[in-house]
Amino acid sequence: MTTLIEAEHLTRYYGTHCAVNDVSFTLAKGEVLGFLGANGAGKTTTMQMLCGNLAPSAGQITINGFDLLDQPKAAKRNLGYLPDTPPLYKELSVQEFLLYCAKLHGVAKSSVTDAINQAKERCGLSDVADRLITNLSKGFQQRVGIAQAILHNPEVIVLDEPTVGLDPIQIREIRTLIRELGQDHGVILSTHILTEVQESCSHVQIIHQGQLILNETTAGLNRQMDTGTLQITTRLVPDINSLLTLPGISSIETMSQNRIKIHYSVTANPAEQIAEHIITAGWGLQELTPIKRSMEDIFISLTKEHREL
Amino acid sequence: MSLILTIASREFRTLFLSPMAWTILAILQFILAFLFLTQVEAFTSLQPKLASIEGAPGLTDIIVPPLFGNAAIILLLVTPLMTMRLICEERRNKTLSLLLSAPVSTIDIILGKYLGILGLMLLIIALITLMPLSLLGGGELDLGKLFANILALLLLVTAFTAIGLFMSCIAGHPTVAAMSTFGVLLLLWILDWTSGLTDQRSELFEYLSILRHFQNIQSGLISSVDVSYFLLFITTFIALSIRSLDNERLQK
């Protein structure tokens, strides 16, 4: 696998405020990396640094083998970037704007028409090509922004909150597009919507207060989420202390008199022992359900843990 | 180079997509045509007297320098309005990141922007030049002097534009950019007014005064001192603009 982006120890200060603190990661071809974080966590700053809009205070960025500082032109030729506000010249028509972008990115004259047509088709812009950008709805403007980022077929595509302002159908289309792009490019997208990461990304990174607190594949994260909590309902009130003595159980949460939540460590699944224990005690087992932790839970627990540290 | 032209042509075309360029061209042309006609009128009334004087000023001397001088003053007011949006507006509309993340150097961006707006300036100068040229139909012009005036106005306007571009790079708001450009230009314009008071002449001020160099060339005396003043001026502010845009990445 070819490494497309190598970011090493990125740090960025705004005055004395540290927005991004020692963030390192890599992106390979065929990966879709989801950059997750609350507002003000440092997502956009990181992306701006990756795209040469902002110089890092410390650290190094290599894009497709070219150092962003030493060979900016070569590095940026492999880069498509959609900032959080799509950079559109609103007085131009979609066609004119894309033509300008193609020229800026040095698309060869012979392939300009093809590149523009392909980008328009992929982003569903063929019908509005001759309209002025200023007259388009926000969703369409966002799509023009995405078209601009993929126009020159770059190796690395960086999308800052690409689905903001789109309607549900458009969101689904864009997610499909992102997955498609991920097959032969490297894609980084930032978002604070967790399902988006689950749906379209192969890797997840969670950034919190400028620091990277999780770097995992989506599959790995899902595995983490499959285990963890059991919800149990019994006819009689269970004795929590005796349940706690079972191996593998980390804590028990009482929801109501007859309903409890059992948290256990990821390695051991004590469901069987718990069931046996309840039945031999004669509390009358009515329900035993594994609870899937949503990505929201992981996100919240991770950021909370971090705050406590 | 092609990148510079790409940016320049977009800049130039965008000017004509809004009423901006059209309005400026129309109003400038109207006012200058009025001044031009006044000057022609003055010449026709003076003509009988001038004919009797040996070595009297000719048609070109009476009409061209005042016309270009007036054009210079009007452009001093208008240039800040045209240059204020160059970088400033891109930054405010967040379109600057399109340029910054494209394989384009800051030098390309600045030169492209500069040439784009200069295209409009050239058009204005060309339209102004047409006025005295129309006299060729009924009289004779000193083409050398006319050329000197065109050159003087051209150098002056390129210098104005360079300052405007720089101000647009550092200002946060177009109005601020326009105001500071206008301030600097006016200051440079009036800098040598002190030289009227003979005992307080300052050679430095006289050298810095943009008006003096402009008038020197306008009089038909194209000396390297004046030309290099303008070239130095333009290069300085272009270089400062490039630096300032480079710094954009460093701090915020």
Image (cartoon, rainbow, N blue to C red):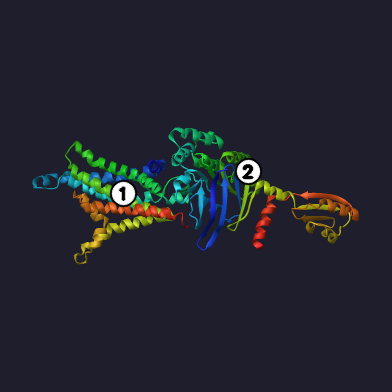
- Residue B251 location in percent, x, y? 47, 58
- The chain containing the residue under callout 2 comes to A
- Residue B92 location in percent, x, y? 47, 51
Name the residue that disc number 2 marks.
A200
Name the residue that disc number 1 marks.
B158
Judge by depth and name the residue closer to the eye, A154 or B206: A154
> Could you say whether the residue bearing mark 1 is in a helix, strand or loop?
helix
Q: Is residue A276 left or right of residue B206?
A: right
Q: Mark 1, residues whose alpha carbon is within 10 Å: few (<14), some, or many (≥20)?
A: many
Judge by depth and name the residue closer to the eye, B202 or A21: A21
Residue depicted at 34% across the width and 45% down the height: B118
- Residue B211 location in percent, x, y? 25, 55
Disc number lying in front (2 or 1): 2
- Residue A121 location in percent, x, y? 55, 34
Q: Is residue A71 left or right of residue B237?
A: right
Q: Is residue B42 visible?
A: no
